[in-house]
Amino acid sequence: MKRKQMLALGLTTAVTASLLAGCGGEKKDKEKEEGGVKEFTAFFAVPGTEINDDNEIQEKIAEITGAKCKETWLTGQTAEEAIGTMIAGGEYPDFIDGSDGTAQLYEAGALIPLDDYIDDYPNIKEYLTEEQWDKLRREDGHIYWIPQFGSVHGEEKVTVHNDEAFWIQTRVLEWAGYPEVKTMDQYFDLLEAYQEANPTMEDGTENIPYTILCDDWRYFCLENAPMFLDGYPNDGSVMVDTEKLQVMDYNTSETAVKYFQKLNEEYKKGIVDPESFTQTYDEYIAKLSTGRVLGMIDQWWNFAYSVNDSLKQQGLHEQGCDYVPLPITIEEGIQNQWHNSGAVFNVSNGLGITVSCDDVEGALQFINDLLGQEVHDLRNWGVEGVDYEVDENGEYYRTDEMRLQVSDTAYKASHLCTYSYFPQYSGTSRDGINAMKPENQPKEAFDGLNDDVKKCFEAYGAETYVDMIGTNEAPGPWYPMYSFSNTMTTSTPGGMAWTKMGEIKHEYLPKVVMAEDFDKAWDEYMKVYEGCNPQAFLDEMQEELERRMEAHKKYE
C-alpha cells in the first residue's frame, strides 16, 4: 500500500480548489485531535449540503465516538471529472465515495482493501451477510468499499417509495376527482386536461405540466421508463426475462417506441417543458421547489429530500403541490414493478478508505460506531425531547412543530447530522419497536403527511406512498444488473459498447422527443444505436447474470 501511495503522490497535476477543500488542502493534517476527538475528512462525488462546523448533533456524536468527519460534496463537476482531478493530484480525503468515478479510484490504487479488517469491527461485520460481503470482492479478491444503503435490520418497514415512478401533484388528482390512472396515455391525458383548465398557480405563475431531468447520469429520468412500463423492476441497464433468465434490451422494444413517440407528441403540444434537455440538476430542483411542475419521472431520493422541505416551508402543500406516485404501465393488465420488497444492494460503489488515511483502524472504528443504535438514532431521529418524543409504548414520534423544524434549512445545518453517505440501516431498530428512520415509522409517517397527501391517500384507500403503486416480491439473486454495468470500462467490447450506447442516447433521445418527424428521427437513432454494437454489451450482461445465479447456489 505504501508503494501505491508514493506513486499517487508522485503525480503533479494540480487539485482544484473544491477538491482541496474536501481533502483538507495539500498539507492536510489528517485526523488531528482537538480535545481527544479525531477529525477525519470525506468527499462524496454527489451533490450534497455541508453542515455548520459547530453542528450540535455532530458534537454529540463526537462525544460518544471520539471522532468527527468534515464532509464535502460534488460541486460544478461530474463525478468522473472530480475523481480524475483528485487522482491526478495524488491527495485524497480519508473517506471517499466516488459514485460514477469509483472504478477510477480502484484502478488508480487509491483505496485500501478492507477485508482483513472487517472481522475486528462487530457492527461492520453484522451490517452485511456473508453473501453480500462476497459480492463486493473485486477481481483481485479484495473488498474496497462498503455500500451505505441497502441493509435492512430486523423487520422491513417501508412507507416511502424511495425509487422511480411517474409522480403527479395531488392538486391534479383532486381536481379530477381522484381518478384511476394506470397507463401512460391516461397520465398524459390528465396532465393535458388539468393544464387546459388550470394554466397557472394561485398567484398567476404559469404551470409546467411535465418536465424531464437529463443532466449527466441523471438522464435515467428520460431513458429507462420503457423497462418499468413493460412491468420489469429496476435492473437499470437491461430487462431480465425471469423464466428464461435472459437479458433483454429495453432501448429497442415496442414499448420504447410508444413511450418516446408519446413524449414527442406531448412536446409538440407544449406539455413537455422545453427546458427539459438543457436544465441542470440544480435548476430542475429549483423549478420543482416552486410548485409549478405538475408531474415528472424521477427517483424519490433524487428530488424529495430537498423539494418537499422547500414546498412545506413555503406553504405550497396547502395548494396541493406535493407529489405522489402512480402505478403506470404501457397498458392496463400489466403488473407494475415500480416497487419491490427487500432493499437494493448495489455493489458498484460505496464508502472507501483511501491510501491517504493515516489511521485506518480509527476510520473503521468510526464507521463501526456510527452503526451503533444510540448514534444511529442521533443521525436519523435527532435528540429526544428536541427532535422527537417517546410515547408510553416506547414509540418515537414528532409533533407538528418538530416536523416543521427539521424541514428548515438553517436548522438542519446547525443541528442535524445524518452522516448521510456513511453506512446506515433501514428496517427496525434494535429495540424491536421503532423504525431506523422517521420516514419509515408507520404512524409517524402518516401523522407527518401534509393534509393534501392524506386526503389523496384516503381517496385511493392507501396509507403510504407504497400503497399508491403496490409492491412485489424481491427480484432474483441477479438483481440489480446495473451494479455490474456501472463497473464496466472500455477495456472490454461490452464495456466499449455500453459507453457508446450512453453517449448516443444522451445525444439522440432529446432530438427524438423534439423532432418534427418522429419516425424519421427514431429510425436515424436506431441506425446509430445499432452501430454501437449493443449485442456485445448484452452478451457480457448475460454472462454476468449467469455468474450471479451460479454464485448464489452455495448460499441456498
Image (cartoon, rainbow, N blue to C red):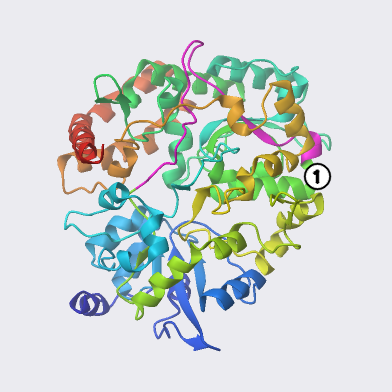
Which one is nearer the viewer's eye here, 556 or 364? 556
Up-down relation of residue 493 to residue 107 (above or below): above
The residue at the point 43 percent across, 46 percent down is 216
Q: Which residues are magenta?
A: 317-346
What type of secondary structure mainly makes up the magenta span? loop
Q: Measuring from the top left, give residue 536's x and y in whole percent.
A: 17, 33
Name the image quarter holding residue 531.
top left
User: From the viewer's perspective, is 468 left or right of 529?
Assistant: right
The spot of residue 294 in percent (x, y) is 67, 31
How crowded pointer 1 is (Cα within 10 Å; few <14, some 14-19, many 20+) is rated as: few
Q: Residue furthest front?
A: 393
Instruction: Work out whether residue 39 can be spotted.
Output: yes
Residue 509 vs residue 108, the one in the foreground:
108
Q: Secondary structure at mark 1?
A: loop
Q: Quadrant of the N terminus?
A: bottom left
* Frontmost residue, 194 versus 249: 249
Which residue: 42% across, 24% down? 226
Image quadrant of residue 446?
top right
Residue position marked by numbered label 1 in the rendering? 315
Callout 1 amino acid: Gly
Q: Is residue 447 magenta?
A: no
Picture coordinates of residue 430, whole percent (x, y) = 54, 54
Q: Is residue 347 left or right of residue 182?
A: left
435 up-or-down from 265: above or below: below
